[in-house]
Amino acid sequence: MHKTDMCRLIIILFLGLTIKCYCQDSLSHPYCGFGKMKEFHGLNSYSSSKSINSATDVGQYFIIPVVVHVIHNGGPENLSDADIQSQIPVLNEDFGRTGRGYNSSPLGEDAKIRFALATIDPNGNPTTGIEHIKSSYTNMNSDSEMLTKNLSVWDRTRYMNIWVVKSLDQVTSAGDEIGYAYLSSDVQFLQDPNADGLVVSYKYFGRNTPYNPASYQFGRTTTHETGHYFNLLHTWGLDGPGLDGCTDGNDDVDDTPPCEYAYYSKYNGTISDTCDDPVQCDNNLRLISDYMDYSVDRCMNIFTKGQITRMRQSILTDRASLVSYENMVATGLENLYLQYNPPVVDALDITPNPCNGTFYLYPDFVQNENSELYIFDQLGRIVKHFIINLKKEKTAVEITNAASGMYNLILITPSQIYKQKLILQRD
C-alpha cells in the first residue's frame, strides 16, 4: 500500500472511531417526567409534599388494587396480558425487599405494601384488572394528557390506575421521558383529579418483556413511579433549573443522604458485581441503590425506613379509601388482604348469639380509637358497616332490615383484626 494511501486510511479510521465514541457519550438517558409534570401544573410552589407525622400506623399490610390501561394503536405497545402481569411480582418484591439487587444496607426494610390486579371492576363485574384500549392517542402529551387518560380511567379512590402508552413527551435533548406520577398530596391541586395514577412507556413496563432495554429489564421504572404515587420525591429533591441537590435539595426524608442531581449509576457486571456509587455532598456516599434515584434496574434494591414511613403516612392520609377493608371486598381482594393480615378467629365475645337484631360486643381489649365492624352475609356481601368505639365495657350493635340467618363479622381495630360468626333469629 502506498504511504499516502496508508495515511488516508489511518485518518479515516481515526475519524470513524472519534465519531463512534462521540455517539456513545451522547446517548440519551431514560428520564422520569415527575418534575416536568409537577412544574407543568404549577405544583412546585406548594408545600404539600411535606411529610405528615401525625398519622397512626400499626404496621398492617396495605393491599393496593391495580388496574392497567394499555393504550395502543395495534403496535408493539399493545403488551400481552402476560407482560402486564409480570409487573405485579416486581412491585411486591421491591416493596417487600425481596427483589434482586445490589444493596444490602440496613437502611431498608419491608414496606408492608403489596399490589394485586383487581378482580372486580367499578361496576361489580369480574375483571382481569387489565384493559386494552385502541386509540390514536398513544403518546402521553402534557398538553392533552386527559385525552389519553379519559379513554379508560377507574375510580382513583378505589384503584391505582396505570396507563401503559407508546411514548411520552421528550423532556430534554439529553433524555427520553419514560414515566411519571403525581404525589398523593398534590392530587388535590390538579385541575382534574382523574389524572392521578402512573404513566409508563411500554418499553419499560413489566419484567423481561421483548421490548425492555437491556439495562431496564427488571421493571423498576414502575417501582420508581409508584414511589412518587406514595409521595416520595427524587433522592436529590425537586427537579428544576439551578438545583444541584447538595445545597438546595431536600426530599423530606432524613435517612436518604444528600446527593447531587441525576447521576445514572451503571452496573459493573463485566468487571465486578458492583454499581457506581460516588461520594458527593460533603463526603456522603450516594445511595444509588435507592428506587427514587436514577440507576439501571440491576443497581436498585432499597426504600429506606424513612421513605417507607413517608409512603405509609401518605396512604393513611391521602389514600385511606384505597386500602380500606370495604374496598378490598369491592375490588375482589378481600382474601388477599386477610392472607396478609390474618384475623384472630372466635376471639370476639358476642352476646346474645343467636340474637334477634341487637347484640353486644365484649372485647377482651380496650381501644382508644374508633374501630370498624363489618357484617357480611353468606354470599360475601356487606350487610352493615359500623364505626364503633370500644372504650366502653360493652358496645351495643343493632342490625335492622336483615333476614334471619348466619352472618360473618369482621372487626378491624388499629392493632388487630377479629372474625366471628353471628346467628340472627328474628322473632
Image (cartoon, rainbow, N blue to C red):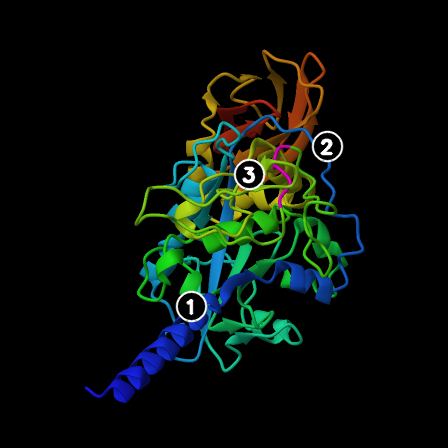
Q: For residue 92, what is the image quadrant?
A: top left
Identified by mark 1, the residue type is Gln
Tag 3 and tag 1, C-beta contact below 8 Å: no
Q: Which comes sooner in the sequence, label 2 or label 3?
A: 2
Identified by mark 3, the residue type is Tyr
Label 1: how many residues lie within 10 Å, few (<14), some (14-19) or many (20+)?
A: few
Residue at screen point 49% across, 68% down? 28
Q: Which comes sooner in the sequence, label 3 or label 1?
A: 1
Tag 2 and tag 3, C-beta contact below 8 Å: no
Label 1, secondary structure: give it: helix
Tag 2 and tag 1, C-beta contact below 8 Å: no
Q: Which mark is residue 325?
A: 3
Image position, residue 419 (x, y; %) = 49, 25
Image position, residue 165 (x, y; %) = 48, 70
Horizontal side, residue 302 vs residue 84: left or right: right
Circle nearer the viewer, 2 or 3: 2
Can you identify the residue that label 1 sits on? 24
Span highlighted in magenta in the image: 255-259
